[in-house]
Image (spheres, grey):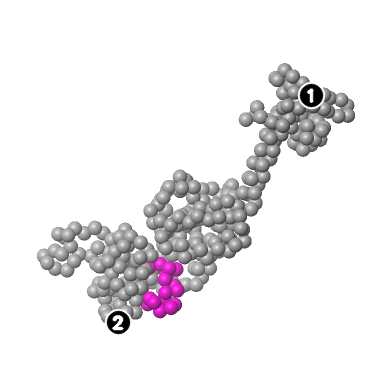
Amino acid sequence: MDEYKPYAVFAEVVHASSMSAAAKRLGMTPSAVSQIVRGMEQRAGVALLHRSTRKIALTEAGERCYPHCLRLLEAGRAAAASLEQARDAPVGELRIAAPLGFGNHIAPALAPVLTQWPLLRMSLIVDDVLIDLISSRIDIALRVGELPDSTWIARKLGQMDTVLCAAPAYLERHGSPKSSLDLQRHHWLALMREVQEVTAEAAFPDGGAPLPNFILETVDDHGRKELIPLQTRTTTSNQIALRQMCEQGMGIARLFYADVRHALEQGHLVRVLPQLRLPSYPLAMLTARRDVEPAKVRIAVAALKAYFSSLALEHEPGSA
């Protein structure tokens, strides 16, 4: 867009009423400014300025041209100012994508940020489906589990510990499991994506017990894995619904500790076999780029990191 530069230089010369003053503002030499204006006049075939040793004055053609050049200069300054504002102050819309159930984490993490920066807005898209981050104009995406290959920058926020939970009413009716083998006789709740497909014909072979379709993984103190085959009674595609069904006494579920901490503290849920160590899942934050992040992203990233770091300190994996 070099063809627009002479117009901006010309507007600066008129605004400053001096070639040397305009050159200082533009970071150029006076001779370079003079050459640009003279080249503009030669291409147009008309004089734009009357020059003397002390001052400059607009010609009639220059007077007609100057307002258009001034608007171009002002637009350029406004564009630069908007970029500086985006770099230095959190403004505009912050778009965050997170799995279902993460709304209760995003709110406490970013509420102080929105309070501090009144010109910042937030749109939270919660969905377990991996949406297109670019077409959805996402600034920050939270992901749990292993990440697919991507050009986005991933930053680890921590580990999401999982625990086995049941409602007190369920345990009163069915008893509390004493060992991992006891788990197989209980009603299990699980997410649909964790459950293996079992056909109706194969579900009850020879009229016997149903085939297991859910594998619970545990880890011993030596890091060895144990796989416990289980049969789910109720499944759902929604992490929030899974927790709610567990609280209603419909069975035992493996849930993220961060999601059920308050329910455990209030007695709505009880840890089942707390001595069992279950796998934890990495929690990562994705952003488009790290080197040229606007202020709204930088500040939100820092707030999310601080929140999840404090959350991790509240729980020791394997504790009762």
Q: Amino acid at mark 1?
A: Thr
Q: Position of residue 318 (x, y in %)?
A: 41, 73
Label disc, if present, on residue 172 of the rendered structure: 2
Q: Secondary structure at mark 2?
A: helix
Which of 44/131 is in front? 44
Marking on residue 96 = none
Q: Residue type at mark 2?
A: Glu
Q: Is residue 118 visible?
A: yes
Q: Image quadrant for the N terminus? A: top right
Q: Residues within 10 Å of mark 2 (few under 14, many from 20)?
A: few
Q: Position of residue 172 (x, y in %)?
A: 30, 82
Which residue is at 30% across, 60% downward?
A: 192
Tell me: 182 left or right of 256: left
For the C terminus, the image quarter is bottom left
Residue 142, x across and y down, in percent: 46, 57
Name which residue lies at 17% across and 60% down.
200
User: Is residue 154 visible from the viewing direction of this image?
Assistant: no
- In the image, 258 versus 248, the foreground residue is 248
| Residue ID for mark 1 | 59
Assess disc 1: are there few (<14), some (14-19) or many (≥20) residues with their C-alpha within 10 Å of its C-alpha.
Answer: some
N-term-proximal mark, 1 vs 2: 1
The quadrant where residue 191 appears: bottom left
Q: Which residues are magenta?
A: 254-272
Residue at 43% x, 47% y is 132
Q: Position of residue 31 (x, y in %)?
A: 79, 27
Name the secondary structure under disc 1: loop
